[in-house]
Image (cartoon, grey):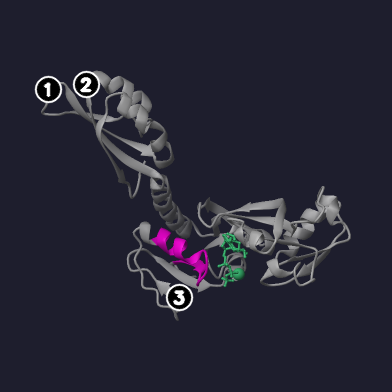
Amino acid sequence: MSETLRLAIQKSGRLSEDSLNLIKECGIDFNKSDNKLTSKAFNFPIEFLFLRDDDIPGYVSDAVADLGIVGENVLAEKGKEVDVVEKLGFSKCRLSIAVPKDYQYDSIQSLAGKNIATSYPKILGEFLAKNNVQAEIHEISGSVEIAPNIGLAEGICDLVSSGSTLISNGLKEVETILQSQALLISNKNISAYKKDLIAQLLFRIKSVQRAKNTKYILLNAPKTSVDKIIALLPGVKSPTVMPLSEEGWVSLHSVVKENEFWGIVEKLKAAGAEGILVMPIEKIVI
Ligand code: PRT
Ligand code: ZN
């Protein structure tokens, strides 16, 4: 068996760019050319297999690849035995049932006896069975959202992200079956050596993820405001406070969640903060 980790990633599609970016942000360098199906990293014992996302769970459960990056939706549909190593937080979407917007929909029972088009027959079948609904599942591989308009089915079960595809096809979302995001999955029987490599990779991934949505904040404030400002800034530990050459003034450094920043900026200013700088962070190692 090869002592290089093998990671399967989507060749081209909605998962590809974020998967490749994550690898790069982990400091792993490699060349990817469009027609190559594999590539070896220069500075980490890892090799990449570029595949269709539907094939990734199977390759990982069969140990052709040790690791894979794939959507929860595809993993659930394929039903392969693998371990989930980490939720990666990108390619978020949901698998939902939708019907024409003027369809009289009261509950899941409104679908009894109807025809539902989907590329997810397994997940949909399990959902209908759990809810004791007898409906026909019509499996199609793409363009599911046009099925009701062409008379192929009364409803659909498909992935939704912004919801605009449903709206532009005159459909309304009535049930959410599954929330999905990209997962790092692994084979269930990994050697101790490769487990150690995966732990090293995961350490890097976590450091990158912690930094996402987190900013470094610097500001100046009168010494007398420091306690008030610190109370507004929940930092990594406690903020760094450094004297400025101007008597009675300090510079304060900390980290802040991007989505919390706009909620506290007015309070910081009211507490006496001036010259507020917010900067990106690449990695947070703890
Ligand atoms: O060729 P390959 O088989 O590898 O790719 P693919 O065509 O099967 O998949 P791809 O690249 O389209 O999607 C890969 C994964 O991205 C999916 O399995 C999901 O985990 C995730 N993902 C996230 C999405 C979406 N968001 C998404 N919006 N996959 C598909 N969509 C489609 C959806 O099917 C619908 O047609 O986008 C449309 C809805 O989008 P909104 O924004 O209009 O709601
Ligand atoms: Zn696919």
The mark nearer the N terminus, 3 or 2, is: 3
Q: Which residue is mark 2?
A: 223
Element marked by disc 1: loop
Q: Amino acid at mark 2?
A: Lys
- Percent x, y for residue 131? 82, 50
User: Badges 1 and 2: C-beta atoms under 8 Å apart?
Assistant: no
Q: Is residue 11 magenta?
A: yes
How far separated are the C-alphas under marks 1 and 2? Answer: 9 Å
Q: Which residue is mark 1?
A: 247
Residue 3 is situated, as x and y percent measured from the top left of the image, at 44, 67
Is the C-beta of the residue carrying label 3 under 8 Å from the nearest atom of ligand 1?
Answer: no
Dot 1 or dot 3: first in sequence order is: 3
Label 1 and label 3: CA atoms lie apart by 61 Å
Stretch in magenta: 5-23
- Compared across the picture, whether 42 is left or right of 112 comes to left
Say above or below: 235 vs 21. above
Residue drawn at (27%, 22%) of the image: 226
Q: Residues within 10 Å of mark 2 (few under 14, many from 20)?
A: some
Secondary element at image label 2: helix
Q: Residue at label 3?
A: 38
Single out the mark in the foreground, 3 or 2: 2
Q: Tell whether label 2 touches label 3 (CB within 8 Å).
A: no
As helix, strand or loop, the secondary structure at mark 3 comes to strand
The C terminus is located in which quarter?
A: top left
At x 42%, y 52%, the residue is 205
